[in-house]
Amino acid sequence: MTEFDQLRAEAESCTLCPLARTRTNVVFGVGRPDSQLMFVGEAPGRDEDLQGEPFVGRAGQLLDRLLAEVGISRDTVYIANVLKCRPPGNRNPQPVEIDACKGYLRSQIRLIRPRVVVTLGNFATKLLLRTEMGITRLRGQAFPWWLDATLVPTFHPAYALRNGERAVATMRQDFELMRRLLDQAPPGEA
């Protein structure tokens, strides 16, 4: 069993917060564990909790479409969430839940070692950038980050779906920035 598989098994048996009692499935993450590109969302929704995979509903369809527009296939990236269990009624993550799960996310990032991390929405952005500044002010930028990765904040796809084409167009700009960063040679290569 690899270290990544051990981490998944640990998360799947986690009881560190009250969400363990209400989940159907732990939504650990999905994709290539050696990917250059990682997405971090907020928390599983109803569909994700039922299927055990992140971004499988309408928000996932938008994510897939935006990836395709910049020439990236979903099966070449890694997708995870801050929380590994669904908050009841899709409410916002609570601090105790974020604290319980953040070690799993940190370990996922450490093991995957992506070159680019895209945070989807406020919760992922605030946690990973250690800021209280909101996504509206942070998106559209690339931040040098941990493990030589670059972090690109953007809106959560569910937000874009609720707020129309202008929000989707804004996400599209952020995905183009992400694509340009991926197309650059990694540090140390020229």
Image (cartoon, rainbow, N blue to C red):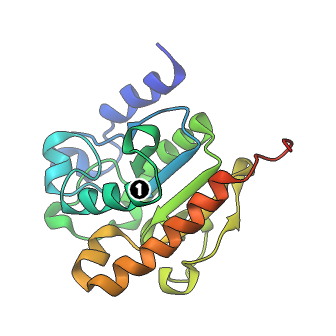
Q: Give percent across and percent down for residue 65.
A: 32, 59
Tell me what residue is drawn at x 36 percent, y 82 percent.
Answer: 167
Question: Which element carries disc 1, helix, strand or loop?
Answer: helix
| Residue projecting furthest to the top | 1
Q: Closest to the observer: 4 or 65?
A: 65
Tell me what residue is drawn at x 50 percent, y 83 percent.
Answer: 134
Give left or right: position of 145 versus 127: right
Q: Crowding near pointer 1: few (<14 within 10 Å), some, many (20+)? A: some
Tell me what residue is drawn at x 47 percent, y 58 percent.
Answer: 70
Q: Is residue 106 at all visible to an observer of this figure?
A: no
Q: Quadrant of the C terminus?
A: top right
Q: From the viewer's perspective, is residue 105 above or below residue 130? A: above
Q: From the viewer's perspective, is residue 153 above or below residue 6? A: below
The picture quadrant where one finds residue 46 is bottom left
Q: Is residue 37 at all visible to an observer of this figure?
A: yes
Q: Give percent across and percent down for residue 99.
A: 46, 56
Give left or right: position of 113 versus 96: right
Give left or right: position of 144 versus 126: right
Q: Amino acid at mark 1?
A: Leu
The residue that label 1 is drawn on is 67
Q: From the viewer's perspective, is residue 54 above or below residue 174? A: above
Q: Closest to the observer: 22 or 152?
A: 152
Q: Give percent across and percent down for residue 157.
A: 32, 68
Q: How many tags in the picture?
A: 1
Tell me what residue is drawn at x 27 percent, y 49 percent.
Answer: 85
Q: Give percent across and percent down for residue 156.
A: 36, 70
